[in-house]
Amino acid sequence: MHPSRTGRPSPRTGGRAASFVAGPVVVALLVVLGSGMLLYPSAASWFSAVNQAEVTEAYQADLRRAAPAEVAAHLRRAKRYNAALTSGALLEAGSRKPSDSGAPRDPSLDYDSILDINGSGVMGHVVIPDIDVDLPIYHGTSDEVLRQGAGHLEGSHLPVGGRGTLAVIAAHRGLPEATMFDDLDQVEVGDEFVVDVFGTAIAYEVTTTQVVEPDETEALRPVPGKDRVMLVTCTPVGVNSHRILVTGERVGEVPQDAVPGDGPRAAVGFPWWLLGAGAALTVAVVHARPRRRDPATGQA
């Protein structure tokens, strides 16, 4: 009796059926895996930006709830800290961040407790409109800190303004899971950025942009009479042999409702990666869906 008449597929027919089912499934899995690898950096960067926005918004909310006297006390201590500094910052070859060489003369000025309203280590945020950056500023420049946002370099002046001060703010460039100072090299002389610390937002106009070697530390020294902030990141990406230094000089204070951008959330942007993920999922479903076979020919 012929096997097909008993309702049992022949070994040859069964092999073709298994191959027919497995082929589209494998293609679908490859589409999903490949798309996931391509979209991961964009998706991870978007989620990182969302987290940074939430951190900044939480800090701003706690600051609004704080007593004015407490805020004023923090700002006074910050100015005392700046007056007590002995020197500025250094750059190190092969490192992803600068290091400090200064220390306040007054041991009662505990760096970590100044300008920390809620214990999170966030002292403010930096807004660079021309490259769509809005990052929380943390105390210090440890690796842990710089994976969360920008870091203020301990040993440089705290970013509260003042003549003869130079605050150094550093952030990573080229992280696969986050976008921070990646486009700092596109900032030009004449552009402005805003440093908003403890309710005082100060605009700075970029006066110099330069790429320096680690032993070129002259630019990291304060200039008497000038209120400046320096933005620092490493270059080239992955090599970190040089530093990009973007220095801005104070223009003036900015009202809170006039800080550039539409708030931390504006820097997050639309999750365009979702469109790619949706397209990849659609292709995968179409390929994996079983196809009806023609009984007469045995083909799909």
Image (spheres, rainbow, N blue to C red):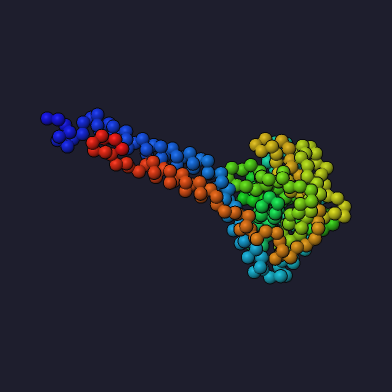
282 lies left or right of 8: right
For the N terminus, the quadrant is top left
> In the shown orientation, is residue 177 left or right of residue 164?
left
* Residue at (25% x, 34% y) in the render: 297
Q: Position of residue 141 (x, y in %)?
A: 68, 48
Quadrant where the C terminus lies?
A: top left
Q: Residue, x 62% and y 61% (percent of image)?
A: 57
Q: Nearer the viewer, residue 203 or 161?
A: 203
Q: Is residue 120 visible?
A: no
Q: Is residue 238 left or right of residue 1?
A: right
Rendering coords of residue 239 (x, y %) = 67, 35
Residue 182 placed where, x, y %? 66, 45
Q: Is residue 16 above or below residue 258?
A: above
Above or below, comparing residue 87 to residue 118 in the picture: above
Viewer-proximal residue among 152 and 209: 209
Q: Is residue 24 visible?
A: yes
Task: Tell me where residue 108 sits by quadrant.
Answer: bottom right
How many marks overall?
0
**Residue shown at the point (70%, 54%) measured from the top left:** 129
Classify residue 218 by image quadrant.
top right
Residue under the image location 76 percent in, 59 percent down? 202
Is 270 placed above or below 29 here? below
Whole-percent x, y for residue 266 in the image:
62, 57
| Residue furthest left in the image | 1
